[in-house]
Image: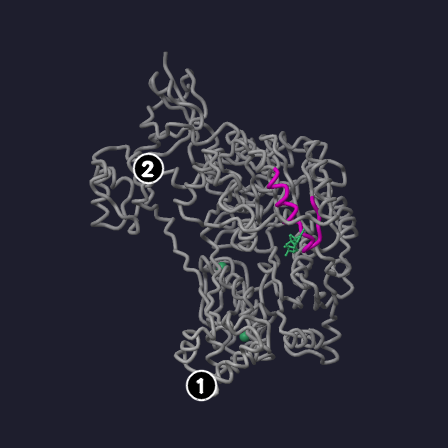
Amino acid sequence: MEYFVNVILPIPLERQFTYSVTPDEADFLTPGMRVAVPFGKSKIYTALVLTIHNVPPNAYEAKEIDQILDEVPLVNHLQLRHWEWIANYYMCSLGEVMRSALPSAFLLESETLIIRNDSTHVEESQLKDDEFLVFEALQHQSTLKVHEVSAIVERKNVLPVLNRLLDKNIIYLKEEIYEQYKPKLVKYVKLGKDYLSDDALEALLETLSRAPKQSQVVLSFFQLQGNSKKPISITDLEKYSNASKAVIGSLVDKGILEEDHIRMDRVRFEGEENSEVKSLNVYQLQALANIKRSFEEDKVTLLKGVTSSGKTEVYVQLISEYLGKGKQILYLLPEIALTTQLISRLQDYFGERISVFHSKYNIQERVEVWNNVLKGAEKAQIVIGARSSLFLPFDNLGLIIVDEEHEGSFKQFDPAPRYHARDAAIVLANLHKANILLGSATPSIESYYNAKLGKYGYAEINRRFGNVLMPDMELVDFKEALRKKRVKGHFSERLLEEIEKSLGNGEQIILFQNRRGFAPVLECLTCGHTPQCSNCDVTLTYHQYKNQLRCHYCSYHTALPESCAACGSPELDTKGFGTEQVEEEVKKLFPEAKVGRMDLDTTRGKHAYEKIITSFEQQELDILVGTQMLTKGLDFRNVSLVGVMNADSLLNFPDYRAHERTFQMLTQVSGRAGRTQKRGKVIIQTYNPYHQILKQVTTGDYETMFTEQIYEREQYKYPPLNRIIKITFKHKNYNTLNEAAEWFSGALKTHFGGTVLGPEFPSISRIRNQYLKNILIKIDKSESLGKTKKNIKRIEKTFKSVSLFRSVRVIYNVDHI
Ligand code: ADP
Ligand code: ZN
Ligand code: ZN
C-alpha cells in the first residue's frame, strides 16, 4: 500500500499538494504536523500536513517528503477549520492564511536569512556536531542563507538543525532583529519622610539658614510644589533654584529630599497581582447580568458603554470567572502599541497569567507564547493581543473579548488574508463553543444592527463611572470666527481661551488634527502648480521639520523647492494644515507650555508610543498634539480639554463609512477629556457647524446617527443590509490594467445577477507606480454569498489564462473595503 500526505504550502496557490511518505511516517504523522518538502527545482519549504491517505495524485508523480519536523501537531483541528473558513470567506488560499497564522520561525525556507544572536552565551560542548558547524560558520560571517547552511552541514535538509538552534536562542531570523527596550527613568524628588510635619519643617529651615544654597533649593522646591500638582523632576529643580546637582545631592544624602524613580516599564511583564478586583457599581452590575444572560443563550454579545463608564472593569469580572473555570481567554485589541496602559491595568489583576502576543515582538517571545498556549500553560491563560493572536493554538478557549470593536484596524488590508479580526473572532468562538463579547462606546453600525435584530445579545452602560459628567461639547463656527477676525492661525479665540484656562489650572490638553506633516499641499501662487509624487497620484505633503516634501503612500521625498517647478516663481504657499503646523503654532502662542506630538512621524521607533504616552501621563507635557492615534482607549487623569482643530476633513472622506467613522473618532477623542471628577471640555472647530453628524457627536446621540446611517446604507445597498466585495486590479501598465478590468467586469456582468459597479479608478489611482482600478459588487442578503464567490473565482481562473492578464494582480476585499 502506498501512503501520501496532503499538505498546505505557504504560497498563494489555491490547492493542496500531495507528497508520498513511508508507511512508518504515515503511521507517525497526524494533521497539523510540519514536514519539510521539496518544491520546484531546488527549494525546500515548510509545509503543514492536512490529511494522510492512500490516493496518489493523478496529474503528477508525488515526491517524497524530506523530513518530519514535529513530534506533536503544531496546529490543532479547530485552527485548521478556522483557517479554512478564513480562506473561503476572504477569498484567498490556505497557504496565505498559514503564512499569516504561524510565527515565521515555524516557516523556515531556503531563502530565509540567519543571523547569530550575540546575547546568548553558548556552551560549545553542548552543541551537536551539525549545530556546532553552523555556529562556527556564524563566527566568521554574520549572516547565512539556508542553502549556505546546507553546504556547511553537507545535507539538503537543514530545517531541523535550524529549528534546534532557534530553540536554543543561538540564532535569529533576519527580519526579526529586535530592538531592546530601555525603559525611560525619570528622577524625581520629594520631601524626606522625617520632614513631613510642620514642626520638623520649621526646624529644618532654621538649621538650613546657615547653608544658603541648600536653603534656596528647599524653598524652590516648595514654590514648585505650590505651582503645580506635578511631580518635581531633578532637572526642573536644578533649573528653578539655580543650584548644582551637587547641592541637591547633599540634601538627598541628608535625607531632607528623597529621590524617586518613576519608571514605566511596559514591555516586560513580571507583574505581580497587586490589585483586588474592584466591586462594580449598579450600572456595571446590570450590564454584567445582561451579558451573562445572553451568554447562557450562546449569543455574541455587544456591550455599549460610554467612554469611561468602566467597561474594562466589567471585562475584568468576566475574565476572573472564566479563569476560575480553567478556561483560556483571548482579549483582542485594535493596536497593541497604543494600549500599553490597558495591559498594565490587567497585569495588576492577573499578573503572570497574562501573555501578550504581538507581531512586533521578537521571534523567541512569539514562539514562546505560541508554545505556552499549545501546552495550555498557566502563564498563557489570558492572551492579550492584536488581530494576529486569533491564530494561536487555543484548545480550551472560554471567552473572547473584542475591545473597541468598531476600530477599523481590526481589518487586515495587506497582505492576504484580508480578514476582519472581529468577524473572524466570532467564528473562532463558535468553533470553540466559547462566549464572545464585543465592547465599544461607539459600536460599529454592523454590530449595533445585529443587536437591534436580536441576533446579538446586548448590554449598555450610559453613565461614566463615579457619575463624572460627559464632557461639555462646543462647536465653533470657524468660518464665522474668520470673518470676525477672531482667529490666530488655525486657533479660534474660543479654543485659545479654553487652552489658557486649562494651562492656568495646571491641567492638560489634547489637540486633535487628523493629518500629519505641516501642510498637505504646496501651491505656487503664480500658476497654481502643486508638486505631485512621481510614483503615486497624490500631492506631496510638506514636512517643515525636515524641510522636505514627502509622499504618504510611498517612500518618495525631496527637498523643499525654492521655486515653482512649472513657472519658476519663488512665491510658494501651503494649503491645509497638519499636526506639525498645529504644534508649531501652539508653541508660539503658549511659549511656556511643554508641547508634544503623537503621529506616525514621531512614533516610528519601536517604543516611541510608550515614551510619548508615558511622558504625557507623568505630566511632563502640558499639551499633546496628535492624529487619530490619540483616540484609542487612553486613560489620562489630568486632561481637561480636548480641541478638535478641523472636523471637516474627516467628514469629506470618499467612503460610505465616513460619517460613522467621524462620529466614532470625535466621540472617542472627546472621551479623553475630564475622566476624573471635574467635567471636561471639548471644542470642535468646523466650517459646517450645522452638519448632522457634528450635532449628533455633541449631543452624544448615537441612536439618531445609527438610524440615519442605516437608512443611507439601505438606499445605496451597503452593509450591513447588503454584502459587498471589492475587486482591485493592480498593474504597472495603464492600458493593460484598463483592458483587464474591463474584461473582468464584462464577465461578471454576463454571469452574475447582482449589482456590478465599475471598473473605476479610486481617488488615488496610482500607488508606487502601480495603477489601480476597482470593481464593486453588491450582493443582496437573499443571494448566496458562497455561490457568488465561487463564480467570481471561476471567472478569475479564465481571466488568468489570458496571457496578457497573467501579471495583473487581483485583490479581493470582502465586507470591509
Ligand atoms: P472605559 O473602559 O469604559 O472607558 P474604564 O474601565 O477605563 O472605562 O473606567 C474609567 C475609570 O473608572 C478608570 O480609571 C477605572 O479604574 C475607574 N473605575 C471603573 N469602574 C470602577 C469600579 N467599579 N470601582 C472603582 N473604579 C472604577
Ligand atoms: Zn508656478
Ligand atoms: Zn508616492
The reply, left or right, for residue 190 in relation to residue 448 is left
In magenta, the rendered stretch is 303-321
x and y percentages locating residue 203 in the rendered image? 52, 81
User: The residue under label 1 is which amino acid type?
Assistant: Lys
Q: Secondary structure at mark 2?
A: helix
x and y percentages locating residue 483 in the rendered image? 74, 78
Disc number for residue 163: 2
In the image, what residue occupies the spot 72% across and 60% down? 468
Q: Is residue 665 above or below residue 160?
A: below
State which quarter of the image contains the N terminus: top left
Q: Is residue 189 visible?
A: yes
x and y percentages locating residue 385 in the rendered image? 52, 46
Please name the residue that numbered disc 1 is placed on. 213
Q: Is residue 719 visible?
A: no
In the image, what residue occupies the spot 52% across and 82% down? 219
Q: Quadrant of residue 587?
A: bottom right
The reply, left or right, for residue 482 in relation to residue 136 is right
